[in-house]
Image (cartoon, helix red, strand yellow):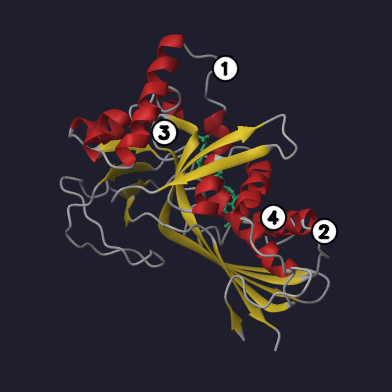
Amino acid sequence: MPAAEMDGQEADGRRRPCDQVRVRVPATSANLGPGFDAFGLALTLYDDLVVTPGGSGITVQVTGEGENDVPLDETHLVVRSIRAGLEALDAPVPGFTLRCENRIPHGRGLGSSSAAIVGGLAAAYALAGVPLDRDRLVVLANELEGHPDNVAAAALGGFTIAWTESGVPNPGGRAIKLEPAGIAAIAYVPDNRVLTKEARGLLPGVVSHTDAAANAGKAALLVAALTGHPELLLTATEDLLHQEYREPAMPESLALVHKLRGSGLAAIISGAGPTVAVLAQPDGKTAGQGAGSGGRAVSFRGAPEAPDGWTRYELGIDPVGVQVWSMEAG
Ligand SMILES: Nc1ncnc2c1ncn2[C@@H]1O[C@H](COP(=O)(O)OP(=O)(O)O)[C@@H](O)[C@H]1O
Ligand SMILES: N[C@@H](CCOP(=O)(O)O)C(=O)O
């Protein structure tokens, strides 16, 4: 029998055991220019997971993105995240079958690893029969991912500002969610991957005070631009902390960012790249979207077609973040 997120609670707050858990988790674009390791936007492109508890071991089935290269054993990122979640919730760790239908490209800067982590942790809440606590989800996901920006947007939806709290009883990732005002995104996704770890390795240990000060101002301005002043998006998406340093790993992406910005579009490197994203208020025309997108049509005046070998996604903003459904035992 299908059940909504909070139905069917036992007296101890845990829910009855379930036959199956279904999870839908959005892609995310992090940084958005000057908001390095802080800003995230949840996008209407999704991975779907189905977890069926049973037995003592695990079986993993993957279709779509990564189907030929992700491991199908205990090292699979979703499996590791389910296990970590169950352990954090003091829940027994059963065997299970995991089915993944992946649409978020891997190693492109659209938060595939964060989606895998947030999706796996959210599944663990349902398997443990514990109501989803999105704030704790951000804490746990940040521990696994190492930076809180994408996981915050995947967990909460919308436009998120994340930070790391220290010196408190429950340290780690924190985030606040704001409502983006009619913003949508075009993602230009190249064929090649750049792993986030590699792109982080290109960043300098120290930046100048001048750059830091200018970047802080732009980041603050971007909050205003995204929440009601879209006319400021182009200037507010200028970054001085990461994009240019990453050029050696993604020269074509930087060239595309410069070209699009030169034509007045607020183009940025999405996450650690190499995807290029354009942020704008859609002009109201309807355009088709890929499978798994959230059904919201967007269009951008003047945004070109994808270069040869690249894929162009027109995406809205996912407003809710990860969603979980339990199918309860009858
Ligand atoms: N859905 C998934 N299932 C299993 N592993 C995944 C999944 N998504 C991402 N990963 C792992 O994370 C890697 C990509 O992570 P990362 O370099 O952070 O790029 P991205 O920008 O896509 O998050 C993949 O190569 C794969 O090892
Ligand atoms: N702030 C991180 C964001 C990485 O995002 P991803 O989508 O590339 O994993 C960074 O810039 O390293």
Of 155 and 306, nearer the camera is 155
Of 56 and 64, nearer the camera is 56
Residue that mark 2 sits on: 90
Disc number lying in front (4 or 3):
4
Residue that mark 3 sits on: 250
Q: Are marks 2 and 4 in contact (CB under 8 Å)?
A: no
Q: Is residue 280 left or right of residue 276?
A: left
**Cα separation between marks 2 and 1:** 39 Å
Q: Position of residue 23 (x, y in %)?
A: 57, 67
Q: Is residue 9 above or below residue 185?
A: below
Residue that mark 1 sits on: 205
Q: What element carries label 3?
A: loop
Q: What element carries label 2?
A: loop
Q: Does the residue labelled 1 lie within 8 Å of ligand 2?
A: no
Q: Quadrant of the N terminus?
A: bottom right
Which image quarter: residue 62? Answer: bottom right
Residue that mark 4 sits on: 81
Which image quarter: residue 222? Answer: top left
**Cα separation between marks 4 and 3:** 29 Å
User: Type of residue at label 3?
Assistant: Met
Q: Where is residue 312 in the image (x, y as percent from the top left)?
A: 31, 52
